[in-house]
Image (cartoon, rainbow, N blue to C red):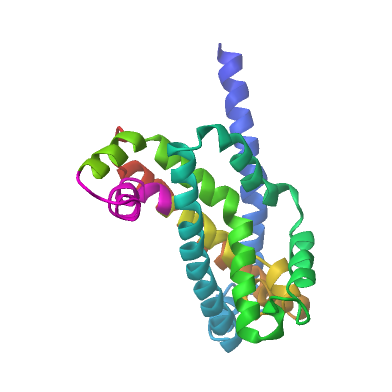
Amino acid sequence: MKHSKLGHWIAVIVGILYFMLPLIATFEFSLRLRRDEYSFDAYRNVLVDPRFQSSFVFSIGLAIATIIVGILLVVPTAYWTQLRLPKARPFIEFVTLLPLVIPAIVIVFGYIRLYNSESWLPFTGSDIGTKILLVFAYVTLALPYMYRSVDTGLRAIDVRTLTEAGESLGANTFVILFRVILPNISSALLSGAFLTFAIVIGEFTFASLLNQPAFGPYLQNVGANKAYEPSALAIIAFAITWACMGLIQVIGRNAPGIKK
């Protein structure tokens, strides 16, 4: 028994060191901008850079648009699948998992080929159209995580009983969906929203090939031209991602029906 517990602790320590040592080394390197002393100059240089501010704000706007479009697309689909089409669930789950097995570069080249300036729907023919196409691409990229979060939330409640109760009171499907179902899966929606936010903030391939000034291409550009600022940016991006994960944990613990 003692040998078994010792093995578990060794595995935990090795895992922590495997993940934490590169992070600690990156953080330590980001403080070495001044010779022979540690400083946060690299972080200050990054935060006062107008390109960082514009690219970060741009990515936040894209993330919010992606979350809204994703919720409008996924919630009705998952709700209708669970209520009326349970036999279609394996097919729907297979479709939502495709972005995990299809490389992002294949998806974006497909979008460019299908929606170029000479196609019947020329999204790439204008700047606003390209931004809309980028939001749709991000919705595709975040689809597995958003769908899983919403589907898990719907499975935790009695969708059929809530729907029948709403119908018995004279509510239509739209009212039931947005005034009955959505409030009951709010924690699942927020989990999917935070995961989508973290994905969009760090995404590079779509934004770069569609030539958009997002945070991912800015991070790559800084990494190609400077030494210490990329490490500071990596730590900032890591902190944002873990802040989102922490919010998911807090919301999950405070969700109705979760035992504390």
> Can you name the residue that lies furthest to the top here?
1
| Of 228 and 56, the residue lying toward us | 56
Q: Is residue 239 magenta?
A: no
* Position of 94 relative to 114 (above/below): above
Dividing the picture into quarters, in which one does residue 104 lie? bottom right
Q: Is residue 250 visible?
A: no
Residue 203 locus on image (x, y percent): 65, 65
Q: Residue at x 65, y 41 (%)?
A: 94
Q: Which residues are magenta?
A: 169-189
Q: Quadrant of the N terminus?
A: top right
Is 247 positioned to the left or the right of 34 in the image? left
Residue 61 locus on image (x, y percent): 50, 75
| Of 25 and 250, the residue lying toward us | 250
| Of 244 and 209, the residue lying toward us | 209
Residue 26 locus on image (x, y percent): 66, 62
Exactly how many numbered labels are in the figure? 0
| Of 58 and 155, the residue lying toward us | 155
Dividing the picture into quarters, in which one does residue 88 lie? top right
Q: Residue at x 46, y 44 (%)?
A: 80
Q: Is residue 20 visible?
A: yes
Q: Is residue 174 magenta?
A: yes
Residue 66 locus on image (x, y percent): 53, 66
Is 9 positioned to the left or the right of 193 in the image? right
Dividing the picture into quarters, in which one does residue 48 lie? bottom right
Please identify the dominant SS of the magenta region: helix
* Position of 241 relative to 164 (above/below): below
